[in-house]
Amino acid sequence: MEVIRPPESVTGCRPSDNLLKRVQSEIDRQVKAFKERALVGRYQYLFLDAAWAKDIVGLSATRICILTAVGVTYSGVKEILGFERVQIENESSWRGFLGRIVKRGLKPEDLELVISDEHKGILLRPKVKQRLREDLFTNWRTVCLLVFAVALLR
């Protein structure tokens, strides 16, 4: 386990199972609080993306999808609004994820720009309008550079 290696290399002994359970419990508590916190900022831009990762439990590994939303406030502060692991990236998973973010305080009417790839689950989300022409922006880095260039020119 990767969690065991750093304390073992520093102290020369393996941490107890009880200590590992307490650390895991504290991490779980903090992640839950982060994911359930109220969103009080006004967000001008919303970046949406998904990434695939290996989920290693014991000796088995499976692939999971991690949906991510990053908001940029009107003062330019970037904030991770949420992340969620799902089995597959589809309309249903995006709809649920975005719905939970809206319930926590994201106001879709405040958004000037929503930046994402062309995944249909994102494009079909009601109340959050895709304001990019997909055929013009196919590269994520290009989109990011354009958004920040526009922000600097204001």
Image: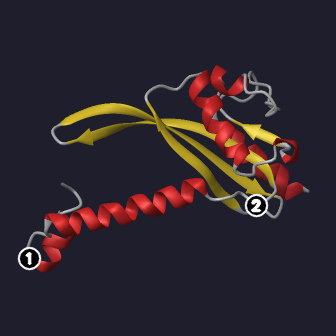
Relative to 110, say whether 116 is above or below: above
In the rendered image, the quadrant that contains the N terminus is bottom left
Picture coordinates of residue 151 (x, y %)? 83, 54
In the rendered image, the quadrant that contains the C terminus is bottom right
Q: Quick check: 126 left or right of 69?
A: right
Relative to 149, say whether 97 is above or below: above
Q: Quick check: 2 left or right of 138?
A: left
Which residue carries the number 1 mark?
Answer: 12
Picture coordinates of residue 11 (x, y %)? 13, 79
Residue 127: mark: none
Residue 40: mark: 2
Relative to 50, say whether 110 is above or below: below
Q: For label 1, count other residues whose C-alpha is less than 10 Å away and answer few (under 14), some (14-19) or many (20+).
A: few
Q: Residue at x 18, y 67 (%)?
A: 18
Q: Residue at x 67, y 34 (%)?
A: 116
Judged from the image, the secondary structure of the residue bearing numbered disc 1 is loop
* Colour basis: secondary structure
Q: Earlier in the sequence, mark 2 or mark 1?
A: 1
Q: Decide which of 75, 15 is in the foreground and name it.
A: 15
| Distance from the alpha carbon under mark 2 to that under mark 1 | 45 Å
Picture coordinates of residue 31 (x, y %)? 47, 58
Furthest toward the left, the residue is 13
Q: Decide which of 18, 149 is in the foreground and name it.
A: 18
The amino acid type, in three-letter code, at marker 1 is Gly
The answer to whether residue 24 of the structure is visible from this angle is yes
Judged from the image, the secondary structure of the residue bearing numbered disc 2 is loop
The answer to which image quadrant residue 134 occupies is: top right
